[in-house]
């Protein structure tokens, strides 16, 4: 096709370039019809004479005839020209439009390719996609789409006692370091509070008293664990006291040889047979012992109870520790979630534990406040 001279007019070229700008901004998404107004073609709407307006309109009609554009208007009205009937431009042939303007398809950055792959292929909620789209992963020789499709397999591994690099190797063609420092992204993808795959075995600190233990108490916070291990009253008698940091989503690993390392407090009872008895119970489930958890009176603490119950059947909140906290909470003490950077904690309907569900969760919902264990 021989290009008519009017295609080179600055006004027409500006129109075509503005339409290509719209294409670039749409970034392969369906482009909605573009309203033909003064911003898109000012020469048409600012022309002094109707004859000049008709000329510009004829240019649009010619481009429509060529198959570049389609012009839509509202229904014809007596006394009104077509360009006065809310005209809209649909781009019919984007490739031809780019050819005429010498504006090829922009080369996408690696970040944009990642975003495209996340939005088109990641099997999660839209809000999660938005977060993951800003956390690009790159692997030499693999496309963004390849990597995202492997991320879709992540939920299949959550119940296995795997370390972070084992998960990476499973997902990404034997490469173990892809997920290093990506715990936040993994937690986001799985919609959990923290990454369930540790970098190394979970470390349990255990205090045994000289009184043989007949139950096990998990304590959430280090200060409280240390206080309990040096308590001179009898309220902890008969309990093996355990501190484990950061295992909300990793409870299953606590009962595997490769997933846990146990360290006994030097100021506690260190008789070999008692230490071995604890390890046999933990790893090999050698005897049935009652188990409790004591931590912050908040939803995160309740979530830990729920997680631990997957590995410790019958575990419940430790009433001697929680009841005084509960009394304080009901008396009006406690803090708002936002005051302690806990506003992102999600409420849960149940933990499966009787005391936690019937008493503590109900109180948390009613009070709308939390109380830290150290209180």
Image (spheres, rainbow, N blue to C red):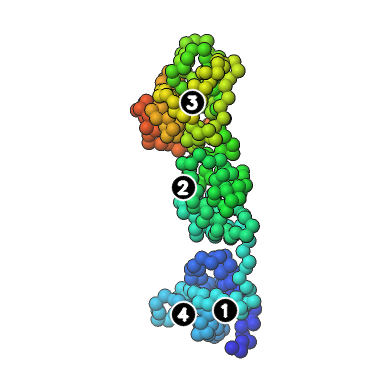
Kindly identify the residue that appears in the image at 51 percent across and 45 percent down: 188
**Residue 205 drawn at (x, y percent):** 56, 25
Q: Visible in this render: residue 75?
A: yes
Mark before the other along the chain sequence, 1 or 3:
1
Please count the marks in the image: 4
**Residue 99 drawn at (x, y percent):** 61, 78
Q: Visible in this render: residue 294?
A: no
Mark before the other along the chain sequence, 1 or 2:
1
How far, Cα to Cα, is label 1 from label 4? Answer: 25 Å
| Residue position for label 1 | 96
Could you say whether the residue bearing mark 1 is in a helix, strand or loop? Answer: helix
**Residue 256 drawn at (x, y percent):** 50, 34
**Local crowd size for mark 2, using a 10 Å CA cut-off: few (<14), some (14–19), many (≥20):** few
Mark before the other along the chain sequence, 2 or 4:
4
- Relative to residue 175, is residue 150 drawn left or right? left
How far, Cα to Cα, is label 3 from label 4? Answer: 86 Å
Kindly identify the residue that appears in the image at 49 percent across and 55 percent down: 122
Observer-side mark, 2 or 4, equals 2
| Residue position for label 4 | 82
| Residue position for label 3 | 280
How far, Cα to Cα, is label 3 from label 2? Answer: 29 Å
| Residue position for label 2 | 156
Kindly identify the residue that appears in the image at 50 percent across and 77 percent down: 92
Mark before the other along the chain sequence, 1 or 4:
4
Mark before the other along the chain sequence, 3 or 2:
2
How far, Cα to Cα, is label 2 from label 4? Answer: 59 Å
**Local crowd size for mark 1, using a 10 Å CA cut-off: few (<14), some (14–19), many (≥20):** some
How far, Cα to Cα, is label 1 from label 3? Answer: 74 Å
């Amino acid at each position: 096709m021989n290009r008519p001279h009017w295609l080179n007019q600055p006004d027409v070229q500006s129109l075509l370039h503005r339409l290509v700008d719209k294409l670039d901004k749409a970034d392969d998404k369906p482009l909605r019809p573009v309203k033909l107004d003064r911003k898109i073609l000012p020469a048409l709407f600012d022309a002094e004479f109707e004859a000049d307006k008709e000329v510009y309109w004829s240019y649009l009609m010619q481009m429509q005839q060529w198959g570049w554009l389609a012009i839509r208007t509202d229904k014809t009205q007596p006394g009104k020209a077509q360009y006065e009937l809310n005209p809209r431009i649909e781009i019919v042939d984007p490739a031809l439009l780019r050819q005429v303007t010498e504006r090829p398809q922009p080369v996408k950055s690696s970040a944009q390719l990642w975003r495209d792959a996340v939005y088109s292929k990641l099997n999660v909620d839209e809000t999660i996609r938005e977060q993951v789209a800003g956390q690009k992963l790159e692997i030499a020789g693999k496309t963004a789409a390849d990597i995202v499709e492997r991320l879709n397999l992540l939920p299949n591994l959550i119940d296995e006692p795997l370390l972070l690099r084992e998960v990476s190797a499973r997902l990404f063609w034997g490469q173990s370091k892809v997920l290093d420092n990506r715990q936040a992204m993994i937690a986001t993808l799985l919609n959990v509070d923290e990454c369930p795959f540790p970098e190394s075995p979970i470390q349990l600190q255990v205090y045994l008293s000289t009184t043989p233990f007949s139950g096990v108490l998990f304590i959430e916070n280090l200060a409280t664990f240390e206080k309990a291990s040096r308590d001179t009253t009898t309220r902890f008698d008969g309990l093996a006291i355990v501190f484990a940091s950061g295992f909300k989503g990793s409870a299953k690993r606590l009962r595997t040889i490769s997933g846990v390392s146990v360290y006994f407090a030097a100021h506690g009872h260190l008789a070999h047979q008692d230490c071995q008895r604890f390890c046999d119970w933990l790893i090999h489930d050698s005897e049935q012992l009652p188990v409790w958890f004591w931590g912050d009176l908040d939803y995160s603490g309740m979530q830990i109870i729920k997680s631990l119950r997957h590995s410790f059947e019958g575990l419940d909140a430790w009433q001697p520790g929680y009841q005084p906290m509960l009394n304080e909470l009901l008396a009006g003490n406690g803090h708002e979630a936002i005051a302690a950077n806990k506003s992102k904690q999600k409420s849960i309907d149940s933990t499966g534990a009787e005391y936690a569900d019937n008493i503590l969760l109900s109180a948390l919902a009613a009070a709308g406040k939390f109380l830290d264990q150290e209180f």
